[in-house]
Image (cartoon, helix red, strand yellow):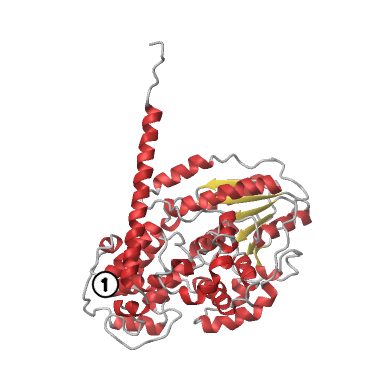
Amino acid sequence: MSSTASSSLIESTAVQSGRIRVLKHGAHKVGPVVYWMFRDQRLRDNWALIHAVDQANKLNVPVAVAFNLFDQFLGAKARQLGFMLRGLQQLHREIQDSFQIPFFLFEGEAIETIPNFLEECGASLLVTDFSPLRQVRGWKEEIVKRVSDSVSIHEVDAHNVVPMWVASDKLEYGARTIRRKINNALPDYLIEFPKLKPQSRKWAAATSSLIDWESLIENVVRKGAEVPEIKWCEPGEVAALETLIGNKNGFLTVRLKNYATDRNNPMKPKGLSGLSPYLHFGQISAQRCALEARKLRKVNPQAVDTFLEELIVRRELADNFCYYQPYYDSLQGAWDWARKTLMDHALDKREHLYTREQLEKAQTADLLWNASQLELVHHGKMHGFMRMYWAKKILEWTISPQEALEIAIYLNDKYHIDGRDPSGYVGCMWSICGVHDQGWRERSVFGKIRYMNYAGCKRKFDVDGYIAYVKRLVADVKKRKGETLLNSKAKQLVNSSVSIPKSL
């Protein structure tokens, strides 16, 4: 794949050329533009969609959005897929009603469905989202090979504020090495979005493919019922924007002022932004979050700066790691010093050894760790500070660093609403393999990897209070599940009952 694209290759007035990479130059042909959406699932503030419509209008051809649904992608269950599909259902309705842009949903392998659709509709340009994950990059490489030579392919980074390839062209060691590069580029990229223009020419088949969303969601939820959906986080763009700037409980409106002090306290979950599920599924733009936060910097400078550090620098550092380090979820991806120290202590005696099943069921001697695992399983999201402690204890309680990493990623991807994300992989790699960190005082099992323990947590927050909070949370979730089950059974009884005519 080509890694660079100049403005001479892409004459786009709406999107800066630095956001776009040409993966394939097609022979000159006039045909529809197709936007293959996957990482940035939104209508508003979407550079990829803006570019697709802009290119279609320049060529005076129609544009369509295509989405490919994978069966339990990287272990995703009802929790993640239900959230995603409910958001896409809203997007489908709005993009069709407001812009008359057709939305096509395919099931199966993208390397088959996307090239087939491009051929069927005679497309001349495919616009795609950017993702640093190797599975997605592998699909794109295969699609580049399979599509006709008359089709051009443009990749747009609509996920990061500063496009990944603009921020850095190499693997960065840590936040301190990438921060200045990102900050230097922010004036060019942290700008207001242009409005999405109407199409100059509509799709010939006026409507998109018929999608039975209710049946689709019901099927996905049933197949992935092992990890049920969560109720506290409503999916979709409207809910995402409400979480950011809503009048009643929006992060920037109500809770921003305490972010710098409260975000590391598990006893203050409302101190967090609550935006990670929406950012992960691309239901809100990080750039929109940054633009809105920047407006409040004079009032809350420390809180805004802390939020922008997490939102931009740390998230983009995670993309950088996953893109430039092919082993981003393996011990092979650790720095040399970290891999050596972990191997030096791989055979150290552990005080406790637990299997994956015991850890998954929160069956350890550490009540604090058990609480964090139960919060993850039942709530779908663990507090950020507890994620670090949780992963480090897995390193301490398993037979090898590689097994620890595999278990941490398995549990993270299975239960977190924002699993299968670069930030999740880097979080596990930081905790277990010292990525983006430094060497610390050497000790058993951990070697020079940063150590965390129960006593340290107790000094930082009310550990007993957190354990009690999780117990209440789990009890509430189980109560709601019981009520839902009763209602479902009652509904089945009503539907299966036979009504007897009064005349009899």
Residue 146 percent coordinates (x, y)? 58, 55
Residue 97 in view of the camera: yes
Q: How many labels sit on residues?
A: 1
Report the front residue among 289 and 480: 480
Identify the image quadrant of the C terminus: top left
Query: Residue at the spot x=75%, y=69% of the render?
Result: 8
Q: In the rendered image, which residue does mark 1 sit on?
A: 397
User: What is the residue that sits farthest to the top in this orientation?
Assistant: 503
Say few, some or many: other residues with alpha carbon within 10 Å of mark 1 (under 14 / 14 to 19 / 20 or more). Answer: many
Report the residue at 39% width, 17% height from top.
500
Residue 220, percent from left and from top: 44, 46
Q: Quadrant of residue 153?
A: bottom right
Q: Amino acid at mark 1?
A: Trp
Q: Is residue 503 left or right of residue 446?
A: right
- Which residue occupies the foreground of this view, 436 or 127? 436
State the image coordinates of residue 358 (x, y, percent, origin top left): 25, 62
Left or right: where does residue 136 sit relative to residue 51? left
Q: Residue at x 22, y 70 (%)?
A: 353
Q: Quadrant of residue 362?
A: bottom left
Front residue (pair 371, 246): 246
In the drawing, does residue 293 fall left or right of residue 431? right
Left or right side of 174 for 2: right
* Residue name at image x 46 percent, y 74 percent: 262
**Quarter containing the N terminus:** bottom right
Q: Secondary structure at mark 1?
A: helix
Expressed as whole percent of the image width and height from the top left, the position of residue 300 reads 59, 76
Which image quadrant for residue 448? bottom left
Does residue 324 appear in this view?
A: no
